[in-house]
Image: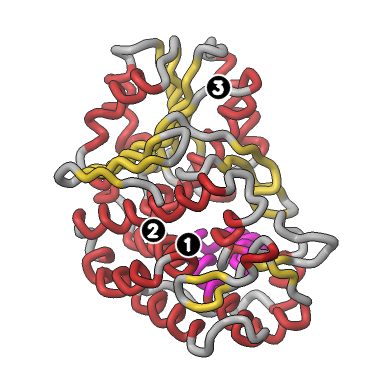
Amino acid sequence: MTSVAAQGRSRVIDAGPYEVRISAGLSAEFAPIIAAVARAHCYAVISDDNVAPLHAGPLMAELAKHGRTSLHVMPSGEAHKTRDTWARLTDELLAAGCGRDTTIVALGGGVVGDLAGFVAATFMRGVPFVQCPTSLLAMIDASVGGKTGVDTPAGKNLVGAFHTPAVVLADVDLLATLPIEHRRAGLAEAIKHGVIADSAHFAELNEWLPALLAGDATATLDAVARSVEIKSSVVKTDEREHGLRKILNFGHTIGHAIEHASGYALLHGECVAIGMVYEARLAERLGIAEEGTAEQVEGVLTRAQLPVVRPQSLEPEQIVAATRLDKKARSGTAEYALPLRIGKMANADSGYSIAVADAAVLEVLA
């Protein structure tokens, strides 16, 4: 279990080789922390066209006190998390005179963090980077764990690298500008963490939902901190996803398939919510999960105002075909992380991953 040091409305979580710092108002300290933890000659900030106008200005001004700076803005949205955007950003870094003495700063949601991390992992064969997540989903999940990458026409996150950040800096005050649908989407990953590892946290989230949906800072900080604690504990045990880390994939095999098959029409968290419901039902149908597990998962997600049914525009066969392209598939068969019950995942003795025949998945989706 990771340690959480509380100082007023702040948390510092030990994530192994780096810290996750969570606080209200922390963005005022971003620049000196970055300069201390990942000192560089040049600081290259990567953001998107939604976040940069809101938050990049103050960060750039403060970073300029510590070295040369450059700002690189990408279009927002999952549809732009591609190799083409990666290529453009790396070319921009070279044009800006960035070299091996560069620290890349990811300022944005999960898409920006994944892509900026992949740029950092590959630029000059790897330079330091810092995660400054600005969405709830990125704070709760995407910024932690060191997975970076881009999507391809064949599927989501199929090209990438493990590259841990020097530090993760999460200012919950930045969530004030977050649209409500993105706040709901972030809660999906928090609920997932409760299902896979902590039944008490699952129950807490159910109680906190009104405050979380309303943007209450204290409830948000506590939810983010506990989620980061759960995820970092798992990742420290299994950094490269050979065993325990696979439990973090709950809801993601079907969720990623829906996300890809829909052309990213739904938010990632919305797709994960749908995926969790179907995968919990699948676990019950296979005799793995306790009866009622899927109902509990669906109930909390519904109260979080998240979708729990596949888009009617997608046929079950489309979704199943997309699961075969998932990076978790083996020998053409999709593998799933399935719950035994709330707070406990199945198949611990065999690496937590369960190959499931397409026919069973089609039955659940239908």
Residue 150 horizontal/vertical position (percent): 63, 43
Secondary structure mostly seen in the magenta stretch: helix
The alpha-carbon separation of the residues under discs 3 and 1 comes to 29 Å
Q: Tell me the magenta residue range.
A: 253-276
Q: Residue at x 40, y 59 (%)?
A: 186
Query: Disc 3 designates what residue?
Result: 127
Mark 2 burial class by Cα count in 10 Å: few <14, some 14-19, many 20+: some
Most foreground residue, 175 or 265: 175
Element carrying mark 1: helix
Circles 1 and 2, Cβ within 8 Å, touching? The answer is yes
Mark number, residue 269: 1
Please determine whether, in this image, residue 124 is positioned above or below residue 253. above
89 on left or right of 223: right
Please name which of the two marks, 1 or 2, marks the residue nearer to the observer: 1
Q: Can residue 262 be seen here? A: no
Element carrying mark 3: loop
